[in-house]
Amino acid sequence: MKEKIYKEPIKAEIETTINVLYDENILSIYTNKADLQRKLNKLIGEPTKEDKRKRSIIGSTWEIPLDDKIKISRILLKVNIFEI
C-alpha cells in the first residue's frame, strides 16, 4: 500500500464538519486536519473522497450510512473530533 502524504493547513484554516443528512440517511464527516485524517482512515477505513493538491492530501470526506452503528460508535468513542 502506498503511503499517503497529508498536508497540514494553516492553523486559521483548520476545519472539521460533521453533517447528518437525514434525507440521504448519511453521516458526512469532512476534515482537513492531517492527524485526524490519519486516525479516521485507520479507524473506519478509506474516505469516500480525498481533496488533493499535487501529491498531498489536503482534505478528506467520509460518508457513513446512519444504519452503520458500529462505525459511528467507533468514531464517537475513539477519535477526539472536538479537540477539547
Image: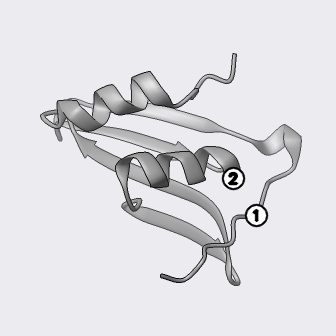
Residue 50's spot in the image, x, y percent?
51, 66
Q: Eyeballing the image, is 72 above or below 6?
A: above
Q: How many marks?
A: 2
Q: Residue furthest top?
A: 84
Q: Nearer the viewer, residue 30 or 47?
A: 47
Q: Eyeballing the image, is 35 above or below 66?
A: below
| Residue 48 falls left or right of residue 83 | left
Q: Residue at x 87, y 49 (%)?
A: 10
User: Which comes before the other along the chain, label 2 or label 1?
Assistant: 1
Can the viewer see residue 27 in this picture?
yes
Q: Please tell me the numbered disc located at residue 34.
A: 2
The kind of residue tagged 1 is Lys
The kind of residue tagged 2 is Ala
- From the image, tell me which residue sits under label 1: 7
Quarter location, residue 26? top left
Label 2 close to label 1 by CB (< 8 Å): yes
Q: Nearer the viewer, residue 35 or 66?
A: 35
| Residue 82 falls left or right of residue 27 | right
